Image (spheres, helix red, strand yellow):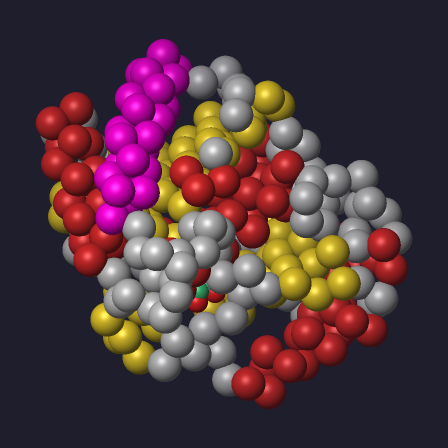
Amino acid sequence: MSSPSPALAYRLEAARAVVHDASRLAMSMRPPPGGPVATQKSAQDWLTETDGAVEAFIASRMKTLFPEDGFQGEEGGVARSGQLRWVVDPIDGTSNYARGRSRWCVSLGLLDGDEPVAGVIEAPALNEVYTALRGAGAFLNGKPIHASPVKDPASAMIEMGWSNRVPKPVFMEKIDAIMKLGAMPRSGGSGALALADVACGRLDGYIEIVINLWDVAAALPLLAEAGARVSPFLRDGGLTGAATILAANPHIAETLSQAVNIPLA
Ligand code: LIP
């Protein structure tokens, strides 16, 4: 990929400041540890007051900064079209946020047409900020990140996301395949943070059968710049609806892809 344009570099810096302010808003509204403080959209699918407040905050700030850019949010849908389009998940890991747990984040990605070109993911309760710009690397708190060097699936840690959109037999079949490889299974409740963990080497793979563009838009540039292998999520329907994603370090990607029958790009 050629070096990024100054316009995109400027947008990433502006987005990082907006996401930081949004993260402070989310922290100020954070529920205490305990039972879920949220509206239940369906089984295991939550909506907190913070989701709406953070998305409105980010939408307003990005419209002021870049009125010519498009904008799409998990809660509000496509607000504006544009060659450059911001895609936000205001609270990714809502089920964790609603109970006062720490594994959640504010995720803001930028697409140029159909190409993910930049992303910011801030996990304020974990004091972590991931950033990526295509052609300029991926970073965690300003330090370069890379996919893990783990080659043996029996030494690997693989996370799989779950939602009520996935039939239980399908979920169990993939978990069984992961365990048959000898890998250690995990499930953490935030697809964006799990994909970021693949990018920085804390995880060796992430799979989710039904996940949305706003969950992954900021993570896709991170994964590309960190040298991870990824399935063709956007081509498989992810641009306009939910689709399956697999992301893994380059050493075990093919083995994992074949074990769970999810092709790589
Ligand atoms: C979450 C995703 C996660 C999925 C959860 C939920 P939300 O997004 O990040 O990958 O497994 O079911 O959809 O709802 O917290 O923004």
Give the answer, above or below, for where 174 lies relative to 135: below
Residue at the image point whose x is 19% and y is 32% from the top: 62
Q: Which quadrant of the figure has residue 47? A: bottom left
Residue at far top of view: 6
Residue at the image point whose x is 36% and y is 12% from the top: 6
Is 17 included in the stretch rendered in magenta? yes
* Residue 114 showing in the rendered view: no
* Residue 153 showing in the rendered view: yes
Depth check: give the residue in front, 25 or 216.
25
Depth check: give the residue in front, 130 or 255.
130
Give the answer, above or below, for where 205 lies relative to 243: above
Is 247 included in the stretch rendered in magenta? no
Depth check: give the residue in front, 49 or 71.
49
Residue 179 lies, in percent from the top left, at 78, 71
In the displayed structure, does residue 136 sit left or right of residue 19?
A: right
Residue at the image point whose x is 85% and y is 66% from the top: 182
Magenta part of the protein: which range?
5-29
Q: Which quadrant of the figure has residue 154? A: bottom right
Q: Quadrant of the N terminus?
A: top right
The chief SS type of the magenta part is: helix
Residue 43 lies, in percent from the top left, at 36, 81
- Locate ligand 1 by image quadrant: bottom left
Q: Which quadrant of the figure has residue 173? A: bottom right
